[in-house]
Image: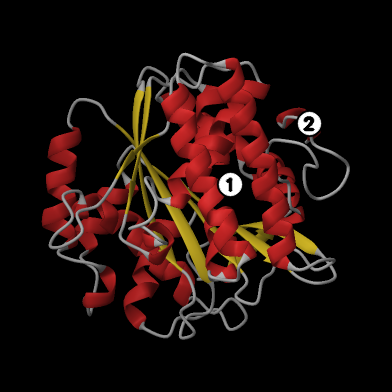
Amino acid sequence: MKDYFKQVDTGSLSSKMGFGIFPYFEVFDETFKKSADRAFSNFFFEHSTVTKWMVYSDYIIGDKNKKSDVITFTFAPYMSGFVNFEKAVEISSFKDVKKLRRVNPEFLDLLKHSPILNVSVMLNQNRKIAYDESEKDAILRAFDGLQAMVQHWQENEPESPEKYRSTFRDLMFIRRELKQNKTNIRLIRDIYIVASIAAYLMFEVTKTIDVNIMGWFSDRDDLLNYKSSQLETPTIFRLTHILYHILCENKGIDSKNNPIFFLPEKEGKVSYDAMLRIPDIICATLADYDFDKGKFSHEKFTPILETLFASNEKILTMEISMLKDSNTAIRRTFDKNNSATDLC
């Protein structure tokens, strides 16, 4: 793991500059490499001629009526036929899954046979990223490392001063809010978790094939809206951009200024709403599933699991448990009997 990052010490966080590694990230990386990397890499090798990728995301976080918190990223190659595919998704999906009594089988069939990859990460709801110290102190130290990294870039790339100045200002603002107890620690923690996983997955794509453009299209969410009126760029995008660049730099990969971020409209219909229905349906299915009992709270999810999830290498599901005594990660796989298998 250490060769991924710049100046990472033996503790859970960098003491100087760079990517703060919390235990959840280490176990996620190790398990992903063992159980999901082959399917992930094979998908992108099959589409290695595509250099422009769209990433759509959805989240279910903090819903006490759900069994798990879930983050889902949908990787879609931008190639001939993409616009027609987007229209087909809009026509067959109807609307977000929470507003449906049943899911259109044509939509499920379309997704199963389309050239898209979905990666979901399930999180335990009572999680913390640090137990040996306060989460606030741990996150502050992580931001110290990121600020030092940005300052290092600014000093070594004087031709782009404003880019780094604005990034540094945003990081300083967030750190100040944290220190003065003016912000929600749980929200900042989850922003950091999602940003680190997003950066990791996008980097793994870039490491596998030549990527010219990597665009991230997020749904409206508290993760995106945090202090939006006081920041030049949403925190989750800032963090993802920094972490992605650190990963690329340490492997000698040209980041090409990726990822590129797209903000949803503040009001009304989101312009890429149709494509957001793909991570939406996957996210909602996983969040509703009771793994202990092997059933859903609503029957509309059963055909989704049986048709879309079962034996499908284009849907990768990881689960991270952040507990006081240990941090663990597994990959979940599914069969047509609604049963789930854990892969370490």
* SS for callout 2: loop
Give amino acid for label 1.
Answer: Ser
Looking at the picture, which amino acid does disc 2 mark?
Gln
Mark 2 Cα within 10 Å, few/some/many (few <14, many 20+)? some
Asked whether residue 315 is in view, the answer is: yes
**For residue 265, side relative to residue 193 (left or right):** left
Dot 1 falls on a residue whose secondary structure is helix
Residue pictured at 62% horizontal, 61% vertical: 319
Work out whether mark 1 precedes mark 2 in sequence or the reverse, and give the earlier one. 2
The spot of residue 248 in percent (x, y) is 59, 25
- The residue located at (75%, 60%) in the rendering is 328
Instruction: Give the residue drawn at x 63%, y 71%.
Output: 124
Mark 1 crowdedness (10 Å alpha carbons): few <14, some 14-19, many ≥20 = many
Out of 216 and 77, give the one closest to the viewer: 216
Question: Pointer 2: what residue?
Answer: 7
Quadrant of the rendered image containing residue 113: top left
Please indicate, yes or no, whether residue 339 appears anywhere in the rendered image: no
Residue ID for mark 1: 196
Q: Nearer the viewer, residue 59 or 111?
A: 59
- Pick whichever, 60 or 265, lies toward us: 265
Residue at left offset 78%, top offset 31%: 7
Residue 298: image x %, image y %?
37, 83
Where on the picture, by quarter, is residue 59? bottom left
Q: Is residue 175 above or below residue 84?
A: below
